[in-house]
Image: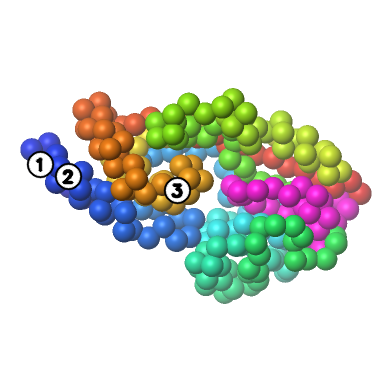
Amino acid sequence: MADHDDTSDPDEIFEALIAEAGTASVDGWDFGWLDGRATEQRPSWGYQKLLGERLAGVQAALDIQTGGGEVLAGAGAIPPVMAATESWPPNVAKATSLLHPLGAVVVADPDEPPLPFADAAFDFVTSRHPVTVHWAEIARVLRPGGSYLAQHVGHSSVFELVEYFLGPLPEETRRARHPERDRAAALQAGLEVTDLRFERLRVEFHDIGAVVWFLRKVIWMVPGFTVEGYRGQLRALHEQIRAEGPFVAHSSRFLIEARKPS
C-alpha cells in the first residue's frame, strides 16, 4: 500500500491510488491485494476448514466455480477423485497450476447446464461464492446419499457500496440471493436441506484504491464499472474516507448443506 500522509497533495493521492488499483491484477479469487487497505469479518463456521474435514471422508468430489482454485487447494485434503469447474480462462489457468499437482482435474465449463459429468458421478459437491446455482444439475451429479456443501453470497451484500454508485435499488433486487430462496430451490430439485446458517459481516474500505480494485474484481457489483465512468463519485468518496475514516459496508454469507436422499 502506498504511503500517503495528510500533508500530501489530495489530487496526487487520489490519482496515485486509483492508478495503482486500476492496473493491479484481478486474476484468480485471491483478495490478498486488499491487505492493509480493506477488512472483512469472516463467517463463524470457517468454510475452508469444514471443506477439508468433509473432503477427507469422501471418494469422489466436485468443486463448482472454483475460481483460481485457492480455497480448494488450501483445504488440506483431496479425495481420490477430485474435479473442479471454472468458466473464466485466466482462472482456469491459475486453478490448473494450483490443483493439478494435488491430483485434481480442472474442467473449463461455461457455468450453464448441463454440468459435463455423468449422473451420480460424485458423493460430494461443493462451491464457494458461486455466481449461479443450478440445483437440478447438482442433484443430478450427486450419488444417492451424497451432499452439497457451499458458502453462498447472501442478499444485499455490500449494498452500501453498490448503492453509493447506483442509487437505491428495488426491493426485489435487494432480496435476490436470499437463503430461503435457495432452500426452496434445493427442495424443488429433490434435495433435503440439512444445514442453513446466515450471517451479516462488517466490511471496511480504508482507501479509494481498495474500492476501485474490489469493483474491478467483483464485476457484478456495479456492472460496467470503470474509473473514468465513475471518477466524480470516486473522488467524492475518496474525500469522505480521508475526512471521516473507512467506508463501512456489510457483506452477507450463508452456509448451506443439502443431501440427496438415499
Question: Who's the residue at 76% across and 47% down the image?
Answer: 135
Instruction: Please give the residue where the numbered disc 3 appears in the rendered image.
Output: 224
Alpha carbon distance from label 2 to label 3: 25 Å
Q: Say few, some or many: other residues with alpha carbon within 10 Å of mark 1 (under 14 / 14 to 19 / 20 or more).
A: few
Instruction: Please give the residue where the numbered disc 2 appears in the rendered image.
Output: 13
In this view, the residue in front, 215 or 252, is 215
Q: Quadrant of residue 107?
A: bottom right
42 to 17, vertically: above or below: above
- Label 2: element kind: helix
Most distant residue in the front direction? 229
* Residue contact at pointers 3 and 1, CB within 8 angstroms: no
* Residue contact at pointers 1 and 2, CB within 8 angstroms: yes
- Label 3: element kind: loop
Instruction: Please give the residue where the numbered disc 1 appears in the rendered image.
Output: 9
- Residue 154 visible somewhere in the drawing: yes
Query: Looking at numbered disc 3 in the image, what kind of residue is underneath it?
Result: Gly
Q: Say few, some or many: other residues with alpha carbon within 10 Å of mark 2 (under 14 / 14 to 19 / 20 or more).
A: some
Residue 117, percent across and down? Answer: 78, 66
Which range of residues does the magenta coloring cover? 121-146
Alpha carbon distance from label 3 to label 1: 30 Å
Q: Is residue 217 left or right of residue 92?
A: left
Question: Who's the residue at 81% across and 58% down the image?
Answer: 141
Most distant residue in the right direction? 262
Residue 124, percent across and down? Answer: 75, 55
